Amino acid sequence: MQADNMNFQQNEKLFSSKLFLYLSRILILYTFSMIFKSFDHTFMHNFRTFDFRGQLFSIIAVVFGLLAWEGAVRLSRIIEKRIAHKQTSRKLAILCTTLVIYGLLIAYAFGFVYGLMDMVLFHRYEAWDSWLSFSYDLNFGIFLFYLLILAFNGIVHYYTIWKEYQVQTERLMRENIQAKYDALRNQIDPHFFFNSLSVLTNLVYKSPDLSADYITQLAKTYRYILDKKFENLVTVQTELDFLDAYLFLIRIRHQQSIQFLASIDEQVKSKGMIPPVTLQLLIENAIKHNRFSANDPLVITVKSEGGYLVVSNHIRRKANPDISSGIGLENIRNRYSLISDKEIEILTADEMFIVKIPVINIA
């Protein structure tokens, strides 16, 4: 898939290059010059369309056509700038009218060059006489091919504009998604920090030494949040390393009342990705909504299962639950919706509260 994408990008760059653009114009003009020879019956004599006269005609047609083509492009840009303030329908009418008039002049000018070349180099006067008499075959034929080229150029031009619009729309969409994701991540920073300061305030008066250890681990956990601030995903192992410091803070506050058990495949740890601070929010959510004690601890387990991290705990609702800030589960759900088509699953079964977090694998 990645190789196909690289090939597509390389081909797209090739097709968008100026070299490819001018080579395609030359091929089109040469093809039209070969077809156009049927309008001048002198070329049909003995079917000698590939002799020196015929090829010289094609070369002049290509050179003249490239100049006329480039002139039409520049003329279109000038007109579009000057009538940018007008309504779309009027702009289109003015642009088409101008290009048609330009095409008539180009057709007449080419007839002059063609007839003059034929007369001077080959002493053939048929094309010159046709030009002098405004021959339908000569002038209309050239003008018809001009319209075909103009139509082709218009298709290419508007396809390019459409592609640029698509790229710009996609870029704006990505920026919008990233802005929303950053806003969700920024919710976590003050929320986590102020909760930790609240714990530290109570701890300082009880044990200065323990407070020092708490501050050290708090610095580690907050450093993690700052370091991962601009990352959408981290490995499961990185998140578990962060949890070691965070659980130290939990154990200082709640002693053995909170237990955390992890059973995760090594492959998932090293290759699996999740949004940073996801597991910490789930643990905090469980502590916030459940009662626990040293004799009856709250056991929170996390295991890998079928492409998910399954986080679960027994439901022991508090009589007076802590006031929720609404950050935890909703934050995780919203972050997943912005970075993946997978969603978190929240289940309640057999007195168990279960949250299934998709593990994202990036090749």
Image (cartoon, helix red, strand yellow):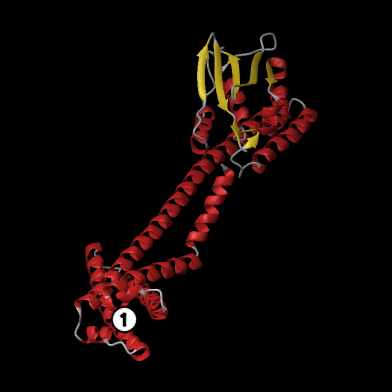
What x and y, as percent, mark residue 123?
Answer: 33, 90
Residue named by callout 1: 110
What x and y, as percent, mark residue 48?
Answer: 37, 75
Image side of residue 157 versus residue 249, left or right: left
Image side of residue 84 versus residue 258, left or right: left
Residue 241 lies, with reference to residue 47, above or below; the image says above
- Pick whichever, 44 or 157, lies toward us: 44
Residue 273 lies, with reference to residue 125, above or below; the image says above
- Pick whichever, 172 or 117, lies toward us: 117
What is the quadrant of the N terminus in the image?
Answer: top right
What is the quadrant of the C terminus in the image?
Answer: top right
Image side of residue 9 versus residue 61, left or right: right
What x and y, as percent, mark residue 136?
Answer: 19, 76
> In this view of the protein, can residue 150 be seen by the observer?
yes
Q: Secondary structure at mark 1?
A: helix
The amino acid on which the numbered mark 1 sits, given as a three-letter code, is: Phe
Sort mark 1 into few (<14), some (14-19) or many (20+) by Cα contacts within 10 Å: many
For the point 65% across and 42% down, the residue is: 226
For the point 54% across and 29% down, the residue is: 328
- Pick whichever, 132 or 9, lies toward us: 132
- Pick whichever, 127 or 162, lies toward us: 127
> In this view of the protein, can residue 246 be seen by the observer?
no
Image side of residue 5 versus residue 268, left or right: left
Q: For residue 207, which quarter of the picture?
A: top right
Q: For residue 52, which quarter of the picture?
A: bottom left
What x and y, as percent, mark residue 36?
Answer: 31, 72
For the point 78% across and 31% down, the residue is: 213
